[in-house]
Amino acid sequence: MEQEQEQEEEEAKRSDSCPICLSSILQESYLDQCFHKFCYNCILQWAKFVPSKHSPQQSFVKCPLCKRKSSSVVYEYDGYSFKQHLINQDSETSNFFTKAHKYRLQCYYVEPGNVIGDINIMRYWKSYKYRQPNQWLYSWVSREIQALIQEKDVDIIVHHILGVIDSWRRNEPKGCKISPELKQEEFKRMVADAAKPFLRGRTDRFVNELENFLASALNIEAYDKVYIKHLGWKIPGINDGNDEEPEERDPLIPLLSFSDEDIDETA
């Protein structure tokens, strides 16, 4: 009986969460055909940055859950009236959201795990490599935040997160013996606190991705190639020119995919 009640509570909790940002829904909105529910800003961003393979300015959006096409978003419904936003009612486009941004955002819709299998996370902490600055970190975090919130100007957010990390490194007590496990936990909690106001439901995953990138000691290009190879994806322009033969593996499919042409999921 308790198990059934817990399942019902979990289902109710999921129904109140936005399928895109995974947090509680802000400004409830619905697609006009399937009536799946999302945050208003989340579904507008989805419609803006998920072009069809035929035209980047389609007059409809495919639902992230059921793929049904809708031409508008219904919001501010009070039981008597509502407002309606027509898809692509303006012609504003953005050219900053590259294939690399799309690939990184799709990674957040794949089941989490250690996708870089050769990385020994605890070795990173036990060897004190976390004390060393990473010259690629600013660019990597910038791209990550841009992909997650789908905004170009993220400098303030990036400076805030990196400032917290830098302060944490510089203010580490000298001669204080703290276990690598506790140091790792402290770092992840500190980064999560800095990022959560901006990333909301994606915060914990972002922290894990950040830790993987730092522990890899790779530059962004090399990291992307290793990451994509492990996922089994083929993304033109990112993993081109890789001389190594790809491993035989079933490609991991994003839980919410962007479009049919963005990723070639054949082995």
Image (tube, grey):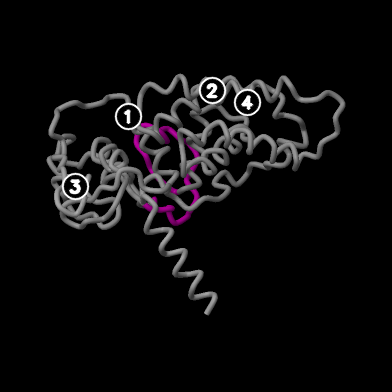
Where are the magenta residues, as a range?
232-255
Mark 1: few, some, or many residues within 10 Å (few <14, many ≥20)? some
| 209 or 221: nearer the viewer | 209
User: Is 210 within the magenta?
Assistant: no
According to the picture, the residue beneath numbered tag 4 turns out to be: 165
The reply to whether dot 2 and dot 1 touch (C-beta < 8 Å) is: no
| 189 or 83: nearer the viewer | 83
According to the picture, the residue beneath numbered tag 3 turns out to be: 74
Considering only order in the chain, which callout, 1 or 2, is on the residue closer to the N terminus?
Answer: 1
Nearer the observer, disc 2 or disc 1?
A: 2
Question: What secondary structure is found at the residue carrying circle 3?
Answer: strand
Who's the residue at 56% across and 31% down the image? 194
The quarter of the displayed image where residue 151 is located = top left
Label 1 vs label 3: CA separation? 26 Å
Q: Is residue 157 above or below residue 11?
A: above
Instruction: Count numbered badges in the picture.
Output: 4
Q: Of the residues shown, which amino acid type is indicated by label 1?
A: Phe
Which percent across, then down, holds residue 75?
Answer: 21, 45
Label 4 vs label 2: CA separation? 9 Å
Considering only order in the chain, which callout, 2 or 4, is on the residue closer to the N terminus?
Answer: 2
User: Is 233 within the magenta?
Assistant: yes
| 115 or 22: nearer the viewer | 22
According to the picture, the residue beneath numbered tag 2 turns out to be: 160
Which percent across, then down, holds residue 229?
Answer: 48, 43
Q: Of the residues shown, which amino acid type is indicated by label 3?
A: Val
Q: Is residue 210 left or right of residue 13?
A: right
Considering only order in the chain, which callout, 3 or 2, is on the residue closer to the N terminus?
Answer: 3
Q: Is residue 114 above or below residue 56?
A: below
